[in-house]
Image (cartoon, coloured by chain):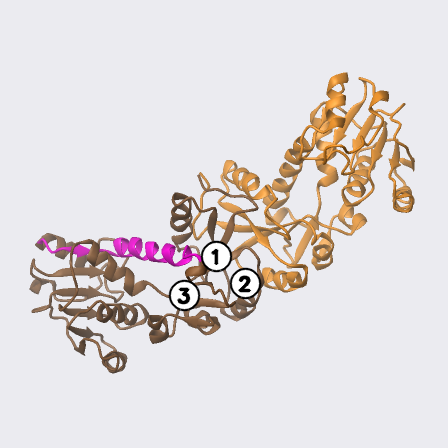
Chain colours: A orange, B brown
């Protein structure tokens, strides 16, 4: 049973549309499981009204956290007083908490969730060669997280070559693993990551050539609907260790929970 | 189990402080019981920030209703495009819903809840003589509701004589039942109503002289903590039909639920 009274601490998820988000139920249940009297509720706000909402949010006395979804991730990043280096890299946040000094600290865990789901399957990305398809918002976050987690080489594949090359340049400037252009051919890679929408709709082409997958590869996919995309189905058929969008989401939720529940004295 | 997802419709209760309010749990459970996917959450906002919050609330796409508690009832009344005649009388609202034409319609059910709790005990106020102690915000609302429900005579008792006399003048101008000054002596009245804080703290004097109560009188009290005030205890000892603050609150909550769930096409 969700606790709910005047003393329940408030967290909101802002987006437009909002009906599709799943975190209100999941995060609120997770708060309750940890014995925290807090709730996460959906707030549907137009982009034109976001800055006024954030201005009020600054001053609400029982609001502790803000989760951010489309189309507000960039504007919320701008509103934050500080952000994690991974958020500074992609110039977007998906979560905000209060700072001891006032204002908000932003972060985002899309990439962290992907890596964490992989690690929970016993796969260590350190020193590995990874192929990632998709270089949009989620793709940028996951590429950053893969480099942070120690992959030795990251190949990026995207039909939008300009976007792909721009991200490659920016990632190489970090001085972590080597980032190169990739293709739909997974041959020779240890980790295969789909960060593109391919697989959301019936009839979508597969993001990589599944006929060339081998059982020793880890295959991860960010798509949550359907959970079992054709890529994940192919990986399972081959016996690949794999991580679907739902498992990534669960790992992401745990990271968000840890972030929101960090005691004020332990925050920067 | 409270339903909670991105599609859950949002209602808020605004106040400062807010931790003491009980309606988030009660109203949300009531929504669920009626099969409505909606929630009521506490929002603690300073008086200085209320107008900005209301300005944003006007534009939120999934916010359907606002419950209002201290100290915002008058400012929220001012923000409403329209209000019920009982809210116009006391110049305060405790609840707001969207109007088909845009903006908010305000109402308040403190008095209605008192009368409804009485009626649920089988007591019909029509033609009765009532003594009411307390002429503040709740007292004004209850006095108005008692006259609306048909009491023939209403005697008001308050240590603040100026406030009492001003309310008497305004109530008599309505042209309903006769309103006169009263005292702490309940002799001769059918209905005894405590709308003052007397009974909240141990050692408070009783609002009326309980030694003069008789079993034929209805005794109602607005105090919710403690539920059984010395006045209610005295009434029970005598065998009076009685209504405590908790019963009044339950009746009030049903009125608020009906108000918020009125279909848009049935709203003025």
Question: In front here: A249 or A229?
Answer: A229
- Read off the residue under disc 2: B57
* Left or right: A259 as drawn, with respect to A144: left
Q: Residue at x 20, y 65 (%)?
A: B193
Residue B242 colored in magenta in the image: yes
What range of the chain is rendered magenta?
B239-263
Q: Residue at x 13, y 68 (%)?
A: B128
Query: Badge 1: how crowded within 10 Å, few (<14), some, or many (20+)?
Result: many
Q: Are marks 1 and 2 in contact (CB under 8 Å)?
A: yes
What mark, if any, has residue B12 been given in the picture?
A: 1
- Percent position (x, y) of residue B146? 22, 68
Q: Residue at x 20, y 58 (%)?
A: B118
Instruction: Mark 1 or mark 2: name the one nearer the start of the chain.
Output: 1
Above or below, comparing residue A113 to residue A209 in the picture: below
Q: Are marks 2 and 3 in contact (CB under 8 Å)?
A: no
- Read off the residue under disc 3: B70
- Spatial distance from mark 1 to mark 2, Cα to Cα? 10 Å
- Percent position (x, y) of residue A15? 64, 52
Residue B182 colored in magenta in the image: no
Query: Badge 3: how crowded within 10 Å, few (<14), some, or many (20+)?
Result: few
- Percent position (x, y) of residue B205? 19, 65
The secondary structure that dominates the magenta segment is helix
Kindly tell me whether residue B86 is visible in this rendering: yes
Residue B241, by quadrant, is bottom left
Q: Secondary structure at mark 2?
A: helix
Question: In front here: B25 or A160?
Answer: A160
What mark, if any, has residue B262 been given in the picture?
A: none
Q: Chain of mark 1?
A: B
Q: Are marks 1 and 3 on the same chain?
A: yes
- Spatial distance from mark 2 to mark 3, Cα to Cα? 18 Å
**Which of the image's four quarters has the N terminus of chain A?**
top left
Q: Secondary structure at mark 3?
A: loop
């Amino acid at each position: 049973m969700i606790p709910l009274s005047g003393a329940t601490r408030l967290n909101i998820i802002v987006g437009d549309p909002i009906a599709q988000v799943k975190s209100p139920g999941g995060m609120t249940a997770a708060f309750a499981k940890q014995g925290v009297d807090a709730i996460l509720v959906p707030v549907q706000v137009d982009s034109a009204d976001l800055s006024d909402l954030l201005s009020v949010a600054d001053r609400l006395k029982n609001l502790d956290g803000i989760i951010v979804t489309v189309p507000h991730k960039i504007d919320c990043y701008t509103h934050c007083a500080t952000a994690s280096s991974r958020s500074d890299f992609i110039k977007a946040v998906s979560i905000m908490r209060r700072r001891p000094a006032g204002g908000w600290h932003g972060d985002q865990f899309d990439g962290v969730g992907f890596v964490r789901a992989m690690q929970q399957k016993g796969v260590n990305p350190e020193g590995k060669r990874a192929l990632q398809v998709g270089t949009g918002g989620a793709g940028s976050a996951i590429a950053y997280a893969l480099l942070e987690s120690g992959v030795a080489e990251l190949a990026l594949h995207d039909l939008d070559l300009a976007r792909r090359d721009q991200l490659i340049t920016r990632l190489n400037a970090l001085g972590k693993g080597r980032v190169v252009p990739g293709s739909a051919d997974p041959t020779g890679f240890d980790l295969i990551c789909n960060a593109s929408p391919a697989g959301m709709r019936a009839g979508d082409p597969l993001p990589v050539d599944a006929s060339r997958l081998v059982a020793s590869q880890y295959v991860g996919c960010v798509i949550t609907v359907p959970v079992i995309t054709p890529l994940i189905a192919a990986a399972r058929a081959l016996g690949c260790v794999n991580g679907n969008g739902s498992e990534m989401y669960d790992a992401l939720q745990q990271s968000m929970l840890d972030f929101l529940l960090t005691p004020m004295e332990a925050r920067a």
